[in-house]
Amino acid sequence: MSKKYKSLETKLIHAGEPHPRINGAVALPIFQSATFEYSGEASYHDIKYIRLNNTPNHVALHEKLAALENAAAAVVTASGMAAISTALFTVLSAGDHILMQDCLYGGTHDLVTKDFQDFGLAYTFIKGDDPASWSAQIQENTKAIYVEALTNPLLQVADLKAVAGFAKAHGLVSMIDNTFASPVNFRPAEWGFDLSLHSATKYLNGHSDIVAGAVIGRAEWIEKIRHKLNHLGGSLDPHAAFLLHRGLKTLALRVAKNNENALQLAQFLAAHPAVANVYYAGLESSESYARACELFEGFGGVLSFELKGDVAQAEAFMQKVQLPIIAPSLGGVETLMTRPATTSHAGMSAADRQQSGITDTLIRVSVGIEATEDLIEDFRQALED
């Protein structure tokens, strides 16, 4: 059992670590074994086997991740979408209905709008900042409500406090994608959420070298999700588990710098005459600012913006910057830049993107941990060249 550590920084280093250490190894070894000796386990799900998500590498991650969000349990998966899909298919059964925030990561949006009907599932999109409208959307078969801590890619902040309260009042499972905020900035269990989902590819790992996911929350739901995951097969391999475990230890340091850089870059862009719009909850001009201040300990490392111009001008700007890498994904130590219409939300129809406010000229920036002044100077030369 892990000791009870008070601070997140200490939990990142020590929570979930084996005691005693395995042959004295300071770093948890990679258990490159598909199977383990049978020890009389009574349940199929307790047999030690990689696909059953219970090897020493898995167990250490599960305990550490649960501790980070002050939740009861956690389970890691082969990708963020494996976490999202497995959690949804555990909470929902054929004939069920779910309330979904109306601005979502493209992969989640595609899963809901294109695949749910094949499984007999129904959904209704709701506005995350309008709690008064939610009750009218509930049906007899509504089982859950799903939101994002910071929406991808417009960085909106739903009334998360109201979401958790609404779910409890109506007997719904509250689910939140906490990828953009990370446990450093927001811990859903502390606000009453049942399940927190992550693409661990992003901030949790932080080095753009693995794909992984995680679900954190109430023990009874995590156990059901693990069983479903065992059947679906979306398990995290030992090498990825090792890298995620290693990456987590610097999470607090990385996210603090991500927060600092993104806020200063957002402020710079908001004041620049060539920029039309900046989407970042840390700006006082943002509609989400007051709510973000109440909920979060930092505003995150992702921002989006639009130039005063067309797609060609947006593309030209992206070619002029020197530090950002033009690539999808986010949450790494390096700054990444993309147009969501061509990457994260390319699976959505143009009409759906427009309805969600995702324009073709929108540029999303995952701000890394480079020197702040270097990033700002690079953006300045690209805007003014």
Image: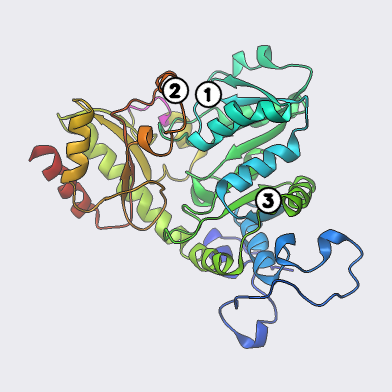
- The residue that mark 1 highlights is 102
3D distance between C-alphas at marks 2 and 3: 32 Å
Mark 2–mark 1 CB contact (< 8 Å): yes
Q: Is residue 29 left or right of residue 223?
A: left
Report if residue 287 lies within the magenta region: yes
Whether residue 120 is situated above or below residue 57 in the rendered picture: above
Q: Residues within 10 Å of mark 2 (few under 14, many from 20)?
A: some
Q: Secondary structure at mark 1?
A: loop
- Examine the image and state in which quarter residue 52 appears: bottom right
Instruction: From the top left corner, tell me how far across and down residue 153 is, in percent.
Output: 41, 34
Q: Residue furthest bottom?
A: 23
Numbered circle sitting on residue 71: 3
The amino acid type found where label 3 is placed reads: Ala
Please name whichever residue, 243 or 286, is drawn nearer the observer in this view of the structure. Answer: 243
Colour scheme of the picture: rainbow
Read off the magenta span. 285-289
Whether residue 251 is situated above or below residue 330 in the rendered picture: below
Please name whichever residue, 44 or 10, is drawn nearer the observer in this view of the structure. Answer: 44
